């Protein structure tokens, strides 16, 4: 059975690249362009992993992660911040909001799938 990955990303080019890479590796990819839609989709889909942009319209990724963590069915779902925020403290802020990991943009197509798979493996081991 294909693993389901939800990508919450408002930039169409970034979303296209992530979808292209992950679908090419056999993952089923779903997407939302804003936090509210992402939260609703996550609750109905119960994905195996959520890739979350931090810079989103209306509700930033930190707020989205906190809301996702309040959903009982999503408490154990890995949320990975995928963001261009790379200043000191940004990673810590993402982790404090409920993200399990952090991948910097621009993503490296050569290593991106391995990074994603590492987080999926951590979920299986938990």
Image (cartoon, rainbow, N blue to C red):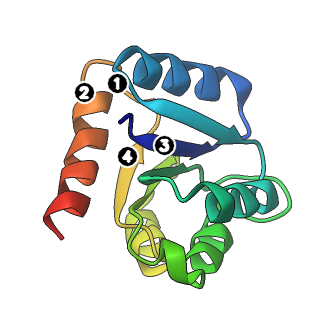
Asked if residue 110 shows in the view, the reply is yes
Residue drawn at x 34%, y 60% as measured from the top left: 101
Quadrant of residue 11 within the rendered picture: top right
How far apart marks 4 and 2 lie (CA) works out to 10 Å
Left or right placement of residue 109 versus residue 20 in this view: left
Q: Nearer the viewer, mark 3 or mark 2?
A: 3
**Label 2 secondary element:** loop
Q: Position of residue 103 (x, y in %)?
A: 37, 46
In depth, the one of 112 and 41 nearer the eye is: 41
Crowd band around label 3 with a 10 angstrom C-alpha radius: few (<14), some (14–19), many (20+): many
Instruction: Determine which residue is flagged by label 1.
Output: 108
Q: Position of residue 91 (x, y in %)?
A: 39, 64
Crowd band around label 4 with a 10 angstrom C-alpha radius: few (<14), some (14–19), many (20+): many
How far apart marks 4 and 3 lie (CA) works out to 15 Å
Q: Earlier in the sequence, mark 1 or mark 3?
A: 3
Q: Is residue 17 above or below residue 34?
A: above
Quadrant of residue 2 within the rendered picture: top left
Question: Of the numbered discs in the image, which one, if any, rests on residue 5?
Answer: 3
Q: Is residue 69 above or below residue 61?
A: below
Question: Of the numbered discs in the image, which one, if any, rests on residue 103?
Answer: 4
Extreme residue in the front direction: 1
């Amino acid at each position: 059975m294909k693993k389901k990955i939800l990508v919450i990303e408002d930039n169409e080019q970034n979303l296209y690249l992530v979808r292209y890479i992950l679908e090419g590796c056999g993952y089923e990819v779903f997407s939302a362009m804003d936090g509210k839609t992402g939260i609703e989709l996550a609750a109905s889909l119960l994905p195996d992993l959520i890739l979350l942009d931090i810079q989103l319209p209306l509700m930033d990724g930190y707020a989205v992660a906190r809301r996702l963590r309040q959903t009982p069915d999503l408490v154990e779902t890995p949320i990975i911040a995928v963001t261009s925020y790379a200043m000191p403290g940004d990673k810590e802020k993402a982790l404090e909001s409920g993200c399990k990991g952090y991948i910097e943009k621009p993503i490296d197509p050569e290593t991106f799938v391995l990074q994603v798979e590492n987080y999926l493996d951590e979920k299986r081991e938990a």
